[in-house]
């Protein structure tokens, strides 16, 4: 299995990385919800059906959903700072 390597720009020091919070993860706060709506719009008959549906829905997911989620990241980061690392879901 090949491991993906992630590089962080030198301008962002580890001491200022955001906490591990779903509110700052674009996949958790926007993309997953849209994917769930597509996947579960009709009943799933078995595990293979679920796997196929997730793949198909992921491939057909509107790129604008992902773009909007990424575009909101900076505002979400500022909101986490404003609430002292508390929950921000009610703000968006």
Image: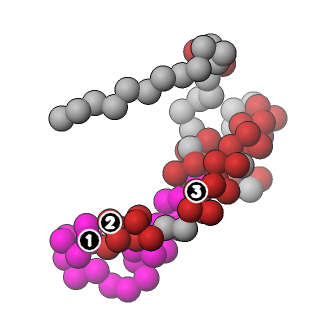
Q: Residues within 10 Å of mark 3 (few under 14, many from 20)?
A: some
The residue that mark 3 highlights is 66
Compute the Cα span from label 1 to label 3. Answer: 21 Å
User: Residue 16 at what x, y percent from top left?
Assistant: 66, 18
Compute the Cα span from label 2 to label 1. Answer: 5 Å
Q: Earlier in the sequence, mark 1 or mark 3?
A: 1
- In the displayed structure, 89 sits above or below 77; it is below
Where disc 2 sits, the SS reads: helix
Residue visible at 28% across and 80% down? 44
Specify whether 53 is left or right of 88: left
Question: Extreme bottom residue here?
Answer: 42
The residue that mark 1 highlights is 52
Q: Earlier in the sequence, mark 3 or mark 2?
A: 2
User: Residue 9 at what x, y percent from top left?
Assistant: 59, 20
In the picture, which quadrant includes the N terminus? Answer: top left
In the picture, which quadrant includes the C terminus? Answer: bottom right
Depth check, front residue: 22 or 75: 75
Find out whether the residues at labels 2 and 1 contact each other: C-beta distance under 8 Å: yes
Question: Extreme right residue here?
Answer: 82
Find out whether the residues at labels 3 and 2 contact each other: C-beta distance under 8 Å: no
Q: Which residues are magenta?
A: 29-52
The residue that mark 2 highlights is 55
Specify whether 60 is left or right of 85: left
Depth check, front residue: 23 or 34: 34
Residue visible at 32% across and 73% down? 53
Quarter assignment of residue 56: bottom left
- In the displayed structure, 23 sits above or below 17; it is below
Depth check, front residue: 37 or 1: 1
| Residue 36 in magenta stretch | yes
Magenta segment main secondary structure:
helix
- Colour logic: secondary structure
């Amino acid at each position: 299995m090949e491991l993906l390597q992630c590089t962080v720009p030198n301008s962002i020091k580890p001491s200022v990385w955001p906490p591990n919070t779903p509110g700052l993860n674009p996949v958790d706060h926007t993309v997953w919800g849209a994917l769930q709506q597509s996947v579960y719009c009709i009943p799933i008959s078995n595990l293979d059906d679920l796997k196929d549906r997730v793949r198909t829905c992921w491939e057909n997911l509107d790129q604008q959903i992902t773009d909007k989620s990424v575009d909101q990241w900076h505002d979400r980061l500022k909101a986490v700072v404003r609430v002292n690392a508390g929950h921000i879901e009610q703000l968006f």
